[in-house]
Image (cartoon, grey):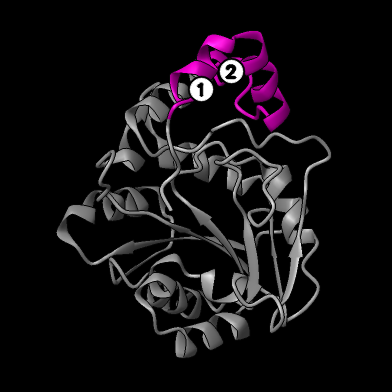
Amino acid sequence: MRVVAIIQARMGSSRLPGKVMRKVLGKPLIAYQLERVRRAANIDEIMIATTTEKNDDPIVTFCEEEKVPYYRGSEHDVLSRYYHAARSAGANVIVRLTSDCPLIDPAVIEKIAGAYSGSSAYVSNVVKRTFPRGMDVEVFSMELLEMMYHEATSERDREHVTTFIREQPDRFQLCDITNGTDYSKYRLTVDTIEDFTVIRKIIEYLYPSNPSFTLDDVINLLNRHPDLLKINAHIEQKR
């Protein structure tokens, strides 16, 4: 069983263009995410799924320099991009990640991927939120992805990839993994300049002394410095 983590990434963003390549301590955010995903024990390969748009050339250049496999596909039909990326990687199981989660904890990936049980299952931590935004992980089979690719027709389902499954709980086997402590109030995703400021400060605090810092390390830092929480507390999540 070949488990491939596919990170969707593009430079275009209505709120914060070029966010994946914004640098902290001299490295782009996508580099931090790759470091962290590589530490997940149950991932066989990591692939970046970007677009054929010219403004995504910097992502491709980064992948080539870092020898990271990548696939270029549709900008807006993200489901198609995932399907063809997974096929090109020879994936049996897909771990879906997004590039606005640069601080993803490998232990969270291992927990969600470890709960995956078979081709009909969809496992995630995004249905009932107890993890912070920015720790989003979804796991499903190539068979399920292929079915979505052929059956999902709405623009929304093609853009958001897994809504087709998540909104049909009577049809699909959905497994929602929750955290022991509810951390849903913490916002660790990057969608706005305020979000980036929070992530930048977290990395600057923690990374120099401990590049392998965990989610608990982040939560402890934020609890010690509640002023950081206030920076992006007002941001509403895009739907």
Q: Give the residue at x 42% y 42%.
A: 30
Q: Amino acid at mark 1?
A: Ile
Question: Would you place residue 36 above or below residue 140 in this image?
Answer: above
Report x, y in % for residue 168: 63, 77
Relative horizontal placement of residue 84, taking residue 226 as reference (left or right): left
Report x, y in % for residue 193: 33, 28
Residue 217 colored magenta?
Answer: yes
Return the residue at label 1: 203
* Mark 1 → mark 2, Cα distance in angstroms: 5 Å
Is label 2 in a helix, a strand or a loop?
helix
Which quadrant of the view contains residue 106? top right
Residue 81, visible in the rendered structure: yes
State which quarter of the image contains the N terminus.
bottom right
Report x, y in % for residue 129: 67, 47
Q: For the stretch drawn in magenta, what is the main secondary structure?
A: helix
Residue 100 colored magenta?
Answer: no
Report x, y in % for residue 167: 59, 72
Q: Amino acid at mark 2?
A: Leu
Q: Give the residue at x 51% y 15%.
A: 228
Packing grade of label 1 (10 A; few <14, some 14-19, many >=20) is many
Along the viewing direction, whichever of 82 and 176 lies nearer the viewer: 176
Relative horizontal placement of residue 192, taking residue 167 as reference (left or right): left
Residue at the left extreme, as displayed: 54
Relative horizontal placement of residue 168, taking residue 163 as reference (left or right): right
Q: Give the residue at x 80% y 62%.
A: 115
Is label 1 in a helix, a strand or a loop?
helix
Along the viewing direction, whichever of 118 and 179 lies nearer the viewer: 179
Q: Give the residue at x 61% y 15%.
A: 209
Residue 41, visible in the rendered structure: no
The answer to the question of whether label 1 and label 2 lie on touching residues, with beta carbons closer than 8 A, is yes
Return the residue at label 2: 206
| Highlighted magenta segment, given as a residue range | 205-234
